[in-house]
Image (tube, rainbow, N blue to C red):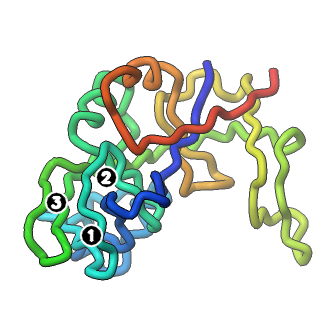
Amino acid sequence: MQYFEVDTLGDEQDKSLVFIDREPEGLDGFGFRLAEGDPTDDIYPADARIYLDPYNPGLKLTTLLGNSIGYLIVHAAFVERLRSHDMTSVELRPVSIYNQRRRLHSKDYWIVNPLRLIDCLDRKASRIQYASSDPTQIVGIDELVFDSKRLEGAPDMFRIPEQRMSYFISERIIRDIQGRGFDNLFLREIHQQP
């Protein structure tokens, strides 16, 4: 089974697109949980709202809303496709998007928060940068390579412990979403070692 990394930035060059640079109001500094795969049952607001930055003019809505906060924010139609797969270890949090004038722009978006970490990184085959002061501490990964044996039984969506702000989806999901008109969705196939 092949897996793909989802680029949460979207098309950064198209300034007409909505781009999000702040977490939903009411998370009181705990928004990092949505970016890193921690549960949010105890902190997520009932009426979560994201207000667009008045200095960012983009208003065009797309399937994936590009953002600089490490969230996977997608349209309800995409979430419906995800629900047809194994999402038992994934939180789906509704969020309303408000425009630069603080008026409702859309109620059709969700923050997708995979909670499951799969220890599948092949550290020898991957290109990893380690801290000079601590050769076991990862400071960056230039190229990800997965160990296919450690992916056996992996869900359709997960994260890895070494890079928790990344989202990986299975080729089953990719086949399911192809040809459905989803936009602003950039994927990168992850190589695997047998």
Asked whether disc 2 touches disc 3, contact meaning CB atoms under 8 Å apart, the reply is no
Residue 24 is marked as 1
Residue 165 found in image quarter:
bottom right
Residue highlighted by disc 3: 96
Q: Is residue 91 left or right of residue 148?
A: left
* Mark 2 residue element: strand
Question: Is the Cβ of the residue at disc 2 closer than 8 Å to that at disc 1?
Answer: yes
Whichever of labels 2 and 3 marks the residue nearer the N terminus, that label is 3
The quadrant the N terminus occupies is top right
Instruction: Please tell me how many numbered marks the rendered image carries.
Output: 3
Disc 2 residue type? Ile
Q: CA distance from mark 2 to mark 1?
A: 10 Å
| Disc 3, SS | strand
Towards the viewer: 143 or 12: 12
Q: Which mark is residue 111?
A: 2
Q: Position of residue 21 (x, y in %)?
A: 38, 72
- Disc sitting over residue 121 in the figure: none
Give the Cα distance between marks 2 and 3: 10 Å
Look at the numbered discs 3 and 1 and tell me whether their residues touch, using CB distance below 8 Å: no
